[in-house]
């Protein structure tokens, strides 16, 4: 039977890396939520919904973070959320899946496939069951209308187009009573 898992933001991370001049900048989003529906006996029936608060971007540099929130990048006033909604799960290995779905960012929706690894399931000291998942994908920011850049005198640009996204999720299984209340209500 499929179980519902709520993503635990305190034990999960949504990070990214992008080339800047001759190095890379790393950052993450601190505000996100979502659910995973997963059945280890029938993983193809799974589903994921994930929402990121775009204004929660954090690179450790307030001036840069404010620039990233501006209309030149994420335009968080106009596009406050980044969302992913799955459409299908395809088993690709013992604990790996391709999760196809729609990623919406900066007002642009694109179909993508996330290579997801199931990291296992375990009980915690408080009587909860937790499950772990991770994925990594490279996206071209310009595909989502995030086009700002500046040319360098010696050729090239300040920023790369490709952004590596890494998501590590720890989720908490909803207790059966909660699932039954949701079904009734």
Image (tube, rainbow, N blue to C red):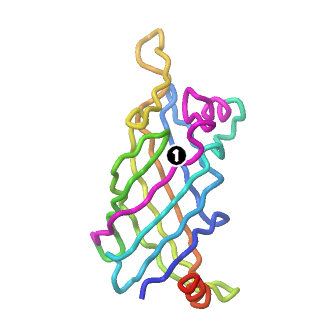
**Residue 36 position (above or below residue 53):** below
At 45% from the left and 45% from the top, the residue drawn is 164
Return the residue at label 1.
Answer: 16
Q: Position of residue 95 (x, y in %)?
A: 36, 75
Residue occupying the point 52% across, 46% down: 16
Q: How many labels, in total?
A: 1
> Is residue 86 on the magenta stretch?
yes
> Depth check: 6 or 162 in front?
6
Q: Which residues are magenta?
A: 64-92
Q: Position of residue 128 (x, y in %)?
A: 63, 85
Residue reaching furthest to the front: 185
Q: Is residue 10 left or right of residue 43?
A: right
Residue 74: quadrant of the picture: top right
Q: Residue 108, percent across and down?
A: 42, 41
**In this orientation, which residue lies closer to the viewer: 112 or 76?**
76
Q: Is residue 49 left or right of residue 10?
A: left
Q: Residues within 10 Å of mark 1 (few under 14, many from 20)?
A: many
């Amino acid at each position: 039977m499929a179980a519902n898992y709520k993503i635990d933001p305190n034990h999960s991370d949504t990070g990214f890396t992008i080339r800047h001049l001759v190095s890379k900048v790393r950052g993450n989003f601190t505000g996100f939520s979502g659910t995973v529906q997963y059945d280890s006996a029938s993983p193809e029936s799974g589903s994921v919904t994930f929402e990121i608060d775009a204004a929660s971007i954090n690179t450790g540099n307030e001036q840069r973070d404010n620039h990233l929130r501006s209309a030149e990048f994420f335009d968080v006033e106009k596009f406050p959320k980044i969302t992913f909604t799955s459409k299908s799960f395809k088993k690709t290995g013992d604990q790996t899946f391709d999760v196809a779905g729609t990623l919406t960012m900066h007002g642009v929706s694109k179909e993508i496939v996330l290579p997801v690894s199931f990291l296992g399931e375990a009980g915690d000291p408080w009587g909860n069951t937790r499950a772990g998942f991770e994925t990594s994908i490279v996206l071209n920011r310009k595909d989502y209308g995030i086009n700002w850049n500046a040319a360098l005198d010696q050729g090239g640009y300040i920023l790369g187009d490709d952004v590596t996204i890494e998501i590590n999720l720890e989720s908490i299984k909803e207790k059966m009573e909660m699932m039954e209340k949701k079904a009734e209500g």
